Image: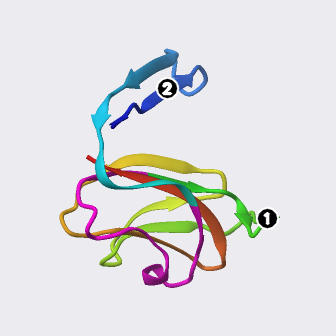
Amino acid sequence: MALIPTLSIKDSTSFSDAINFSVTDSLTVTSPASSLSTIIAATTGANSIIVPAAATGTYIFVRHTGTTNGTTTTSAVVLVENTDDTQFANLKPGEWMFLPHLSGSLGVQVQAASAVQVEYAYWTI
C-alpha cells in the first residue's frame, strides 16, 4: 500500500515575497493503520487513544471538527498528546495536523476540557 500526502501552502499577505509551494511524498504503508474515524475527546487523554502504542512509526492526521455531537463549539481546544501525557500540539476548532509520529513505543491520545469531536487517521510506515 502507498500513502501519497501532499502539502500545498500559498501566502501572499504575511511577507514581502509571496509564498507558493507544494510538496508530495510517497510512503509505503504496513499494518496497523486506521481509516478516517471520529472520537469524542474525553477530559482524560487515556480515555481517547487514537493511535495505539503498538503502532510505532506512524503518520497521523488529526482534525478538530469544531463540533460536539453535531453542535458547533467555538472555544474548546483539543490537546494532542503521547500516551505518556506529554502534550505536543493544541488544535482549535477547524484546525488540523498531519505529521510523522516516531516516538518509540508511545501511542497518541486526545483530550479536551469539554466533549469535542475529533477526526483522525493513522498509517504505519
Please, which colouring scheme is shown?
Answer: rainbow
Tell me: 65 left or right of 70. Answer: left
The residue labelled by disc 1 is: 70
Residue 70 falls in image quadrant: bottom right
- Horizontal and vertical percent position of residue 98: 43, 46
- Horizontal and vertical percent position of residue 122: 40, 53
Of tags 1 and 2, the one toward the viewer is 1
The residue labelled by disc 2 is: 8
Reply yes or no: does residue 15 show up in magenta. no
Task: Tell me the magenta residue range.
Answer: 38-60
Above or below — where is 20 with respect to 102?
above
At label 2, the amino acid type is Ser
Tell me: 78 left or right of 106. Answer: right
Per the model, the C-alpha gap separating discs 1 and 2 is 29 Å
Q: Which of 83 and 17 is in front in this view?
A: 83
Taking the spot 55% from the left edge, 83% from the top edge, the residue there is 43
Quadrant of the image containing the N terminus: top left
Label 2: which secondary element: strand
Reply yes or no: does residue 48 show up in magenta. yes
